[in-house]
Amino acid sequence: MSINKDQVEGRAKEVAGKVQEVAGKTIGNVGQQVKGTINKNVGAAQAKYGDAKSNLKDSDKKYDNATKDSHR
């Protein structure tokens, strides 16, 4: 499985959002907590998108290899 930019950036945003969410909760700042939750979810969505792209790419490679093998 290959790793792509969306997976890396998404997981980084997810972690940063979680930190922001916890910090907001700790200091009692609901606005920061909500922003953190949103950023965490945006990062998770981007990471899932990257996962899907990676899986599609890997499936495409397997298909290409299978069709090459069937022509031998």
Image: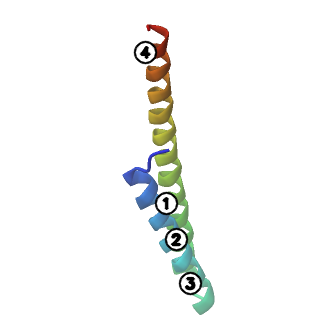
Task: Give, as a three-letter code, the residue at label 1.
Answer: Gly
How far apart are the two marked residues, 3 and 4, measured between alpha carbons? 55 Å
Crowding near the residue tagged with mark 1, few <14, some 14–19, many ≥20 C-alpha atoms within 10 Å:
many
Task: Give, as a three-letter code, the residue at label 3.
Answer: Gly
Q: Which residue is the site of mark 2?
A: 15
Crowding near the residue tagged with mark 2, few <14, some 14–19, many ≥20 C-alpha atoms within 10 Å:
some
Residue 54 percent location from the top left of the image: 47, 41
Which of pointers 2 and 3 lies earlier in the amino acid sequence? 2
Q: Is residue 69 left or right of residue 18?
A: left
How far apart are the two marked residues, 4 and 2, measured between alpha carbons? 41 Å
Q: Secondary structure at mark 1?
A: helix
Q: Which residue is the site of mark 1?
A: 43
Crowding near the residue tagged with mark 3, few <14, some 14–19, many ≥20 C-alpha atoms within 10 Å:
some
What residue is rendered at 60% in x and 81% in y?
A: 22
How far apart are the two marked residues, 2 and 3, measured between alpha carbons? 14 Å
Q: Is residue 26 above or below residue 67?
A: below
Which of pointers 4 and 1 lies earlier in the amino acid sequence? 1
Q: Which residue is the site of mark 4?
A: 68
What residue is rendered at 58% in x and 92% in y?
A: 27
Q: Secondary structure at mark 4?
A: helix
Residue 28 percent location from the top left of the image: 61, 89
How far apart are the two marked residues, 2 and 1, measured between alpha carbons? 8 Å
Q: Is residue 19 above or below residue 11?
A: below
Q: Is residue 32 above or below residue 8?
A: below
Q: Which residue is the site of mark 3?
A: 24
What residue is rendered at 58% in x and 81% in y?
A: 30
Residue 12 percent location from the top left of the image: 45, 66
Mark count: 4
Which of pointers 4 and 2 lies earlier in the amino acid sequence? 2
| Identity of the residue furthest to the left in this view | 5
Which of pointers 2 and 1 lies earlier in the amino acid sequence? 2
Q: Are marks 3 and 4 in contact (CB under 8 Å)?
A: no
